[in-house]
Amino acid sequence: MSLVAPYLNLYDQLSGEENLQFFASVRGGSITGKEIESLLEKVGLANRGLDLVSTYSTGMKQRLKYAVALSNIPKFLFLDEPMSALDDDGKSIVIEVIDEFRDKCIIVLATNEKEEYTLGRQQCRLGQ
Amino acid sequence: MADNNAGLVSKSLAVYVKDLRLELRTRSGLNAIFMFGITTLALVSFSLGQALLEPKVLGALFWIIIFFSAMSGLSQVFVREEEAQTALTLRLTADPDAVFWGKLIFNLTLLIIMAAVITPLFFILTDAPTAGAINFLLILVIGIIDLCAATTLVAAIIAKSSVKGALFAVLSFPILIPILIALTLASEKILAGESIGEISKLLQFLIAYAVIMITASVMLFKYVWQE
Amino acid sequence: MWWKSLIFLAMSVIIWFSFTTPAPQQQIGEASRIFYYHIPQAWICVIAFAMSAYFSIKYLRKRNALNDDLAVESARLGLLFCILATVTGAIFAKVTWGAFWNWDPRQTSIFILLLIYGAYFALRSAIEDEERRAALSSVYAIFAFVTVPFLVFVLPRIVPSLHPTDSVINKDLKFTMGLQVRTIFFSSLTVFTLIFVWIFNILKRYHIIRRKMETGTI
C-alpha cells in the first residue's frame, strides 16, 4: 500500500536518493541505483537526487513523494490531493503516473479540485 | 524492483542507518549528550578540586553523569520524528518491530560514542584507579544496554505527549533506579579492586533486567506506535 | 450493608489488640507494632499496582474505556496505600534506626513505587486525547510493573539491608511469629484488603454508571 499526501513528510536532512533507498529497504525490499535514477526521472527530479530534501521546493517534495510511493509496486495507491503544490509539468507527470499504474493496481484519489475528478474511472461524492 | 520478503534484521538496519545518517548530518542528539556529559564531568571535577575520592563516590558520580547525559539525548530519536512530521510516514511504511529495534540500536550507538569519550576523561580528571579496567568496561556496556532497554519505549511514549523533555526523565527515572543502584554498587566494587566474582550476582541482575525490559518493550511498542 | 459495619468493628478490634498484646518482635520492642499496619499497606500497594497493570492489559486488548477507568482507580488507591506505607515505614525507621530515611532497599522500593505512581499520573495529565492517554498510560503501567519483581524480590537480596528480614518468614519459609501475633497480623491484612476492595467496588460502580450515562444506555 502506498500513500501520497501533503501531510506526509519525507526526511528533510536526507537526499532524494537516500529517502528512496530508506523507504525501499524499510519496506523489506531493495532498490538499485538504476531503479532510483529511473524513478527520479519519471517524476522529473532527474538531477536533484543527491540534494537534500530541505533544498527542494514544495512541488519537488510532492514529486519525490510519488517516487517513494511507486518504488515498490503497490497493490493500493492512495492519493490525497494528488496535484497539490505542483506546476503544470508536475501535474502532467501525475497524470502519466496514474495512467501507467491504472491497470497495475487500485488507485484511490481524494480531492476537492474539479480538474482531478476526471482522472478516475469511478467517482464517489462524500458529504452531500 | 523492491520485494517485501526481507527479514526484520534488514528492515531494522534500514531504520538504524537512516537515523545514523540524520544524526551525522544534524548532530542534534550527539551535541546534547556530549555537552551534558562534558559539562557535568567538568562540574564534578571542578567542585572536587584535588580531593581524592573513594570508590563509592566515584561509582555514583560516574553513573550520575551517564544517566543524566542519557536523559538529555535519548528521547530525541522519537521526538525528532514527531516534530518533523515524518512519524506518520514512518508509521505507514515501516514494521513497528523494525522501528523499535532500529531506534534501540541507534540509542545504544549514541551512548557508546558518548561513553567512549567521557569514560577516559572521567578517569583522568578524577584520578580513579584503573586496575579493573576490563571489568569496569563490562559493567559500562551492560549498563548502557540496560539504559537503552528501559528508555527507548519511554521515549516513544513521551514523543506523543505535550511536555516531552521533563516527562522523559520523570517516567524513566523510577524504572531505572534498580539498575542504577546495581551499577553503582558494581562499579564501586570494581574500583575498589575486587574481582569479577564478587559482583556476579549484580551482573546476573543487570543482564536479566536487560532481557526482560527489551522483551517487554518489543511486546508493548506496537501499542505506543500505532494510533 | 451489614458487612461494612463488620469491617469497622473488625478494624477497631484489631487496632485495640495491636496495642494491648505483647509487641510482635522482642528485639525491636514497641515500635514493631507498626508491622501490623505497615506490611498490609505495603502489600496492598503492590496488589493495587498489579491490578492497575491487569486492567491496563485488558484495556489494550479490547479498548474498553471502563478498563482504563479501573486502571486509574487502582492506581489512585495504590498511591494512597503507598503513601501510608511510606509514612508508617518512616516512623518505624525513625524510632528504630534513628533516621526517617536511609535508602535501605525496601525503603528505596517504596519510594520507587511512589515515583512510578507519580509518573503515571503526570503522563496522564500531559495527554489531551482520551484514547491516546489511555493507551499510553496503560503501556507505562504495564512496563513499570515489570520492574516490580526486581524491586520487591531481587534488589533487597543483593544489596545490604537494614530491614528486619527474618521477622515474618525465615529462611526455612516457616512463620516465626507466635500464634497471637499471627492472628492479629493476618486479621489486619484481611481487613485492610477488605477496605481496599470496598472502596474499589464503589469506584467501579461509579464508573460503570458514568460510562453507561455517556453512551446513553441509562
Image (cartoon, grey):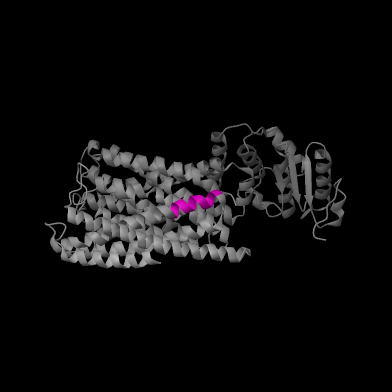
Q: Can residue B63 be seen at all in this image of the molecule?
A: yes
Q: Residue furthest left?
A: C27
- For the point 83% across and 57% down, the residue is A113
Instruction: Please tell me whether residue C203 is drawn above or below residue B92 in the rendered image.
Output: below
The image shows residue B161 at horizontal and vertical percentages of 53, 59
Q: Is residue C197 left or right of residue C87?
A: right
Tell me the quadrant of the picture where the C terminus of chain C can be found. bottom right
Tell me the quadrant of the picture where the N terminus of chain C can be found. bottom left
Q: Can residue B37 be seen at all in this image of the molecule?
A: no
Quadrant of the rendered image containing residue C80: bottom left
- Total labels drawn: 0
Instruction: Please tell me whether residue B138 is drawn above or below residue C182 in the rendered image.
Output: above
- For the point 21% across and 67% down, the residue is C16
- For the point 29% across and 45% down, the residue is C154
Q: Is residue B56 left or right of residue A101?
A: left
Q: Is residue C12 left or right of residue A10?
A: left
Magenta stretch: dominant secondary structure? helix
Is residue C51 on the magenta stretch?
no
Is residue C57 on the magenta stretch?
yes
Q: Tell me the magenta residue range.
A: C52-61
Q: Nearer the viewer, residue B224 or A57?
A: B224
The image shows residue C78 at horizontal and vertical percentages of 38, 60
The image shows residue B1 at horizontal and vertical percentages of 70, 32
Quadrant of the rendered image containing residue B149: top left
The image shows residue B90 at horizontal and vertical percentages of 61, 47
